[in-house]
Structure formats: structure tokens, C-alpha cells
Amino acid sequence: MWNSLFVDPIINLLLLFHFTMGGNGVLAITSLTLLIRLTLVPVSMSQHQIAKRRDAVQGDISEIRERYHEDKVLRIKEENKVYRKAGISPARGCLPLVFQMPVLIALNQSIVSIYASIANLPSDINERVYNWVPSVLGIEMQNIFPLNSEFLWFDLSSPDTEFWLPLLVTLSFLFQQIYRLLLTPSDAKKTRLNWALQAIMPVLIGALSLGYPAGLSVYIIASNVFGVVQMTFFEYIDT
């Protein structure tokens, strides 16, 4: 069920992009990233609007927390009133993350599967390829694998041993977080531990990416760059 719903579709999309992009795995993963993020634009737009409404009421939330700092139950009750009045649903703000987590896990499995060396290819890899894909690509099934997995200094199916990609993952996350804070009203910034938390998260994600296949790091970097462009666009249409 998992493979049918998530892994196999990503494998076949990657194959289509890989051969369309002249056998360049980085361009294939970047194209897939663009497709996924564009698909999630309506959800991301909803999240953006919720965040803007939440930022707008942070002054009221801060006042409530000061007034009822000794009564947690009443404080939460009053905060919920403010959020309901502003039409804010905390659960809806988590939707992009809910959608992207299965994609990240499936993408990790897909990259390791299709960009593996001939000796490490899964025994059922040809069965995972949809019947119509070779026809669309004009390639015989037996000639699809192995794919070229090398780009510059790294191999897409293995962690980057030079550590440049984990560094770029960290920096792209950090830039995206700082950019988001710069777009946040000053009142909202004061009510969060934002600057500390926003600095810690990129470092944590960067450290985790040390064990990711390089192809997944490429996806994360491309996704972060798209995220910055998307935030700029959302802010533009809000003005």
C-alpha cells in the first residue's frame, strides 16, 4: 500500500524527469520539487493567511498572557477566544507539514532505489516502473537502469562525504527562517522565542542531513529556495 501510494509514483516521476532532463539527476529532483511545491501552493497559501492572522493578534495574546499568567486554564480559554474570533485554526497551519512528511520519506526511498549502482538495485525495480513509462521515454525497459547518479563531487544515492550539501541545507533553511521573521510584524516577534528557535532548527536539520542521500538534500535545498520565492509572492499579492 505504501509503495503503491507514495514510492512508486515518485520513482516513475523521477524517471520521467531524469530522462527528460538529459540524464541529469539533480535537474530531475529539482523539477520534481517544483512540481510538488506547486501542487501544495493552495495549502501553503492557506497556511500563510493563518500565519498573518495569528501575527495580527499577537498583541492581544501577549496582553492575555500577562494578565492571566497565574491562571493557565483561564489564559488558554481567553487565547482560544481570540483565535476563534480571528478565524485561526492551529491544525490547519500544520497541513503542509502533514503533506510533505510522507513525500520526504518516499523520496528518500525512491532516490536510494533508482540511483543505486547496478549491484545494489532492488531486485523488483523493473516491476516498480509503470508499463507506459518506457514507451513515453522511447527506451526499452532493460535499458533504463542503472541511472547516472553522479553530479559534481557527490553521488545522489549516498550521503555527501564532503559535507557541502548539509551546509547548504543548513544555510538555505536559516535564510528562509530569517526571511520569514523579517516579514513578521514586530509585535509578533516579541511574543516568540523566534530568533533562538529559528537558528536552532536549521542547524538540527543540517545535522540530520549528514546521513541523508545527497539527492534528498538537493530536494530540501530546492524546496527552501522555492519557499522564499513563494513567501515573496504571497506578500506581494497581500499588498
Image (cartoon, grey):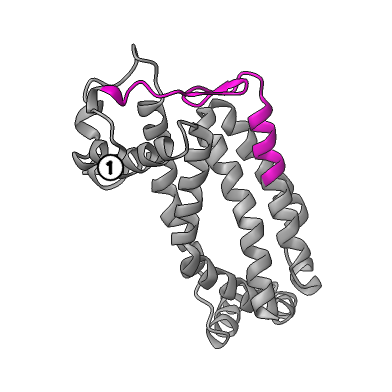
Q: Closer to the camera, 19 or 239?
A: 19
Front residue of this view, candidates 201 and 148:
148
Q: Quadrant of the N terminus?
A: top left
Q: Which residue is mark 1?
A: 136
> Image check: 172 left or right of 28?
right
Q: Residues within 10 Å of mark 1 (few under 14, many from 20)?
A: few
List x then y, in percent, for residue 162: 66, 20
User: Which residue lies at the image location 43% right of the left edge and 61% below the top edge?
Assistant: 39
Residue 91 visible at all: no
The percent coordinates of residue 171 (x first, y second) are: 72, 41
Residue 146 rendering spot, x and y as whole percentages: 36, 20
Task: Say if the magenta span includes residue 196.
Answer: no
- Magenta segment: 143-172
Secondary structure category for the residue under label 1: helix
Please state if 105 lies on the left or on the right of 1 as rendered: right
Amino acid on which the number 1 mark rests in the picture: Val
**210 left or right of 235 in image:** left
Quadrant of image for the C terminus: bottom right
Tell me the residue at 39%/16% (across/down). 117
Quarter-of-image position of residue 237:
bottom right
Q: Position of residue 138 (x, y in %)?
A: 28, 35
